[in-house]
Image (cartoon, rainbow, N blue to C red):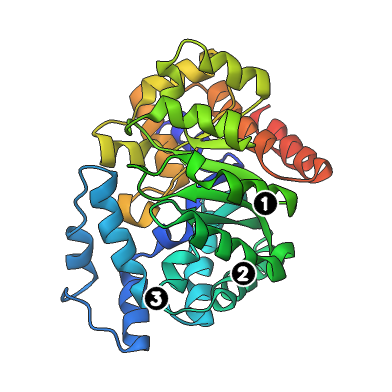
């Protein structure tokens, strides 16, 4: 292993774009299926993993939503989150903001409280036992109606102290951010922070980014590298201090390439670009592997590795005192 690869493995990390449902490893899927009396159409975990073949966002989402059917009880959600948090801890992730998709569960009869209580217990245990801090971000599924999103927002309010913000994910075709403007406005009024997916090379990508900025008023953007397709957007993102949560290995699975050249341009422009793992169980790459893939493609320097993590801690939804502590840890590691 090279010196820089070792440096990447041990650097204190911050992850801001991670779908907890996308961390469901085949082995755990089989365990939960047996627990809940679900028969899977594969003989074993290896066969399930071998079936993962995605050529675009839509083909990925089919398998993604099919996979969550085995997750049913509060303990299932705890086990799902604990598996990810344990893996993240082993990769020196110090802080994570974790997406969850309640509508992927409530739409099949699982109560909202079942989902969030299981996830929350795992986050509390991770902080106590692993010294890993994590928060939850509730995402709305954009291929459902805005009315369903609003109803989900209202369901979340009794658990407001456990959820730091809201996001927007799933199939972007025909589902622009503006469709959910009223939902986001109500979420902002309730004290939630806002983010939204503007996935890579989707139809109307630039228009979606502009809607996120001008009609939604997001605090950051997930993916978002198509901002480089517009001559004015990078400057606008820089002026507003909007960070981008980029997922290189995910990009490679759904678009055929890492888009590492976009990461380089964003770094050179001084934008707050970050590196994240997205759905690591499906792409076989957690945060460390994403950084290593990026290094292999663009020969990252130590300073760039530190800058990517600094960007993440700086745009994370953290109290200033806690953020300063992580940044000091990162500075000490890089010195």
Q: Which element type, helix, strand or loop, lies under badge 1? A: helix
Q: Which element type, helix, strand or loop, lies under badge 2? A: helix
Residue 82 position in % (x across, y down): 53, 68
In the picture shown, does residue 225 fall above or below 18? above
Instruction: Look at 59% across and 51% down and name the residue there.
Output: 183
- Locate the C terminus by quadrant: top right
Task: Name the mark on residue 155.
Answer: 2
Q: Which residue is mark 1?
A: 186
Q: Which element type, helix, strand or loop, lies under badge 3? A: loop
Query: Rounded to the nearest whole Å, what is the CA distance between mark 2 and mark 3?
Result: 16 Å
Q: Which residue is mark 3?
A: 108
Q: Are marks 2 and 3 in contact (CB under 8 Å)?
A: no
Instruction: Look at 37% across and 48% down and name the residue there.
Output: 285
Residue 85 position in % (x across, y down): 54, 61
The quadrant holding residue 174 is top left
- Bin the neighbour count of mark 1 within 10 Å (Cα to Cα): few under 14, some 14-19, many 20 and up: some
Observer-side mark, 2 or 1, equals 1
Q: Can residue 265 be seen in this snapshot?
A: yes
The earlier-in-sequence mark between 1 and 3 is 3
Residue 158 position in % (x across, y down): 71, 71
Instruction: Look at 43% across and 79% down and name the residue there.
Output: 109
Task: Name the mark on residue 6.
Answer: none
Observer-side mark, 1 or 3, equals 1
Query: Rounded to the nearest whole Å, what is the CA distance between mark 2 and mark 1?
Result: 13 Å
Residue 307 position in % (x across, y down): 60, 26
- Bin the neighbour count of mark 2 within 10 Å (Cα to Cα): few under 14, some 14-19, many 20 and up: some
Given residues 280 and 103, the one toward you in this image is 103
Q: Can residue 299 be seen in this snapshot?
A: no
- Bin the neighbour count of mark 3 within 10 Å (Cα to Cα): few under 14, some 14-19, many 20 and up: few
């Amino acid at each position: 292993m090279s010196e820089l690869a070792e440096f990447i493995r041990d650097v204190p990390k911050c992850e801001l774009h991670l779908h907890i449902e996308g961390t469901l490893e085949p082995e755990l899927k089989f365990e939960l299926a047996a627990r809940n009396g679900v028969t899977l159409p594969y003989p074993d975990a290896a066969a399930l993993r071998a079936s993962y073949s995605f050529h675009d966002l839509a083909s990925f989402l089919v398998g993604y939503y099919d996979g969550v059917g085995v997750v049913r009880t509060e303990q299932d959600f705890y086990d799902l989150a604990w598996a990810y948090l344990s893996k993240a801890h082993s990769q020196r992730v110090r802080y994570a903001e974790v997406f969850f998709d309640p509508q992927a569960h409530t739409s099949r009869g699982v109560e909202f409280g079942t989902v969030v209580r299981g996830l929350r217990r795992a986050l509390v245990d991770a902080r106590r036992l692993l010294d890993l801090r994590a928060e939850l971000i509730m995402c709305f599924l954009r291929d459902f109606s805005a009315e369903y999103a609003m109803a989900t927002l209202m369901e979340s309010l009794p658990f407001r102290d456990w959820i730091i913000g809201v996001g927007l994910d799933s199939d972007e075709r025909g589902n622009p951010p503006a469709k959910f403007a009223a939902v986001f406005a109500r979420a902002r009024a309730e004290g939630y922070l806002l983010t939204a997916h503007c996935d890579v090379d989707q139809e109307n990508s630039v228009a979606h980014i502009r809607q996120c900025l001008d009609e939604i008023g997001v605090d950051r953007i997930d993916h978002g590298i198509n901002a480089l397709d517009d001559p004015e957007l990078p400057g606008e993102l820089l002026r507003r201090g909007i960070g981008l949560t980029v997922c290189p290995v995910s990009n490679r699975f759904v678009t055929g390439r890492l888009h590492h050249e976009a990461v380089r341009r964003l770094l050179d422009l001084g934008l707050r670009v970050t590196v994240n793992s997205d759905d690591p169980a499906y792409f076989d790459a957690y945060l460390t592997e994403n950084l290593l893939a990026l290094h292999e493609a663009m020969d990252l320097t130590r300073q760039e590795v530190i800058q990517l993590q600094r960007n993440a801690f700086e745009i994370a939804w953290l109290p200033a005192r806690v953020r300063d502590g992580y940044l000091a840890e990162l500075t000490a590691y890089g010195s």
